[in-house]
Amino acid sequence: AITNTKFIEAGYNQLRFYQNAQLEDCKFNANMTIDFGTNDVDADFTDCTVDGSAPLTDIIYLGDIVEMGVDVTINSEPLIVEAKVADADGQNAKYYLTLAEAVNAATTDQVVTVCANVELANTLTIAAGKVVTLDLNGKVVSGVSATAGTTAVISNKGNLTVKSSVEGGKITTKALYPDTNWGGEGQLSFPSYANNTVRNEGTFTLVSGTIENTSAAGGA
């Protein structure tokens, strides 16, 4: 274990791990990079800080978590990289902690690839005028609605294309309180609100993958 150590700025600001490591109460300079030189390394950071109060994730190369199977924990919490953005040929990849950050950062000709199963706490919105290609990559993007009212996992107001380059990719939702009080005598002929997996107000193309809604029968 490495404890109570300060990594000062130097000519070569890189800390690379080739084996499992535990770091506790260490301080890093904001201009350095932490990365990994071999697959399947475990690195545990406890009470570690970065100069200038930057988050530790700013100096960890997130791509190694996705591409090399590295496991990183920060204060006992696993570091999950939800998505990457790259050119259509896979070049110029950049990795993001959240799918929402990746979607917002992507430009028209780039692809957002989901790198881990994602449970969205808030609706993922594709803004008007935004063009997004989303590769589910065999992962699951989900959302659970725990309140009565209109909801959506993804709200598309732009141009969204969804595909899954690996089998099993899907976008799914489950409403715990769908509107089931409709269609009967003295009731509306349609639900008063809808729980959508994808609410489309723009252009939506599904190339491959699954769109799923597992809300109770009779809901929408």
Image (cartoon, rainbow, N blue to C red):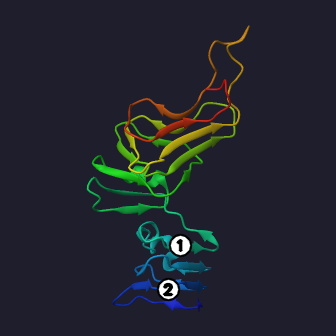
For this orientation, the residue located farthest to the front is 167
Quadrant location of the C terminus in the rendered image: top right
Give the secondary structure at mark 2.
loop
Q: Identity of the amino acid at label 2?
A: Gln
Residue depicted at x 55% and y 91%: 5
Query: As rendered, which of 49 and 201 lies closer to the eye?
Result: 201
Residue depicted at x 59% and y 73%: 74
Residue 48 lies, with reference to residue 215, above or below; the image says below
Name the disc covering residue 19, or none: 2
Q: Of the residues under marks 1 and 2, which one precedes in the sequence? A: 2
Between the C-alphas of marks 1 and 2, the distance is 11 Å
Q: Identity of the amino acid at label 1?
A: Asp
To which residue does mark 1 refer? 71
Residue 34 visible? The answer is: no
Give the secondary structure at mark 1.
strand
Total labels: the figure holds: 2
Residue 214 visible? The answer is: yes
Write down the quadrant of residue 203 in the picture: top left
Left or right: 29, with 24 as reference point: left
Residue 125 lies, with reference to residue 190, above or below; the image says below
Place of residue 54 in the rendered image (x, y in percent of width and height, measured from the top left): 50, 72
Name the disc covering residue 170, or none: none
Whether tag 1 and tag 2 are in contact, CB under 8 A, the answer is no
Query: As rendered, which of 171 and 13 lies closer to the eye?
Result: 171
Place of residue 187 in the rendered image (x, y in percent of width and height, measured from the top left): 71, 12
Quadrant location of the N terminus in the rendered image: bottom right
Residue depicted at x 41% and y 46%: 164
Place of residue 120 in the rendered image (x, y in percent of width and height, measured from the top left): 57, 48
Place of residue 66 in the rendered image (x, y in percent of width and height, measured from the top left): 44, 66
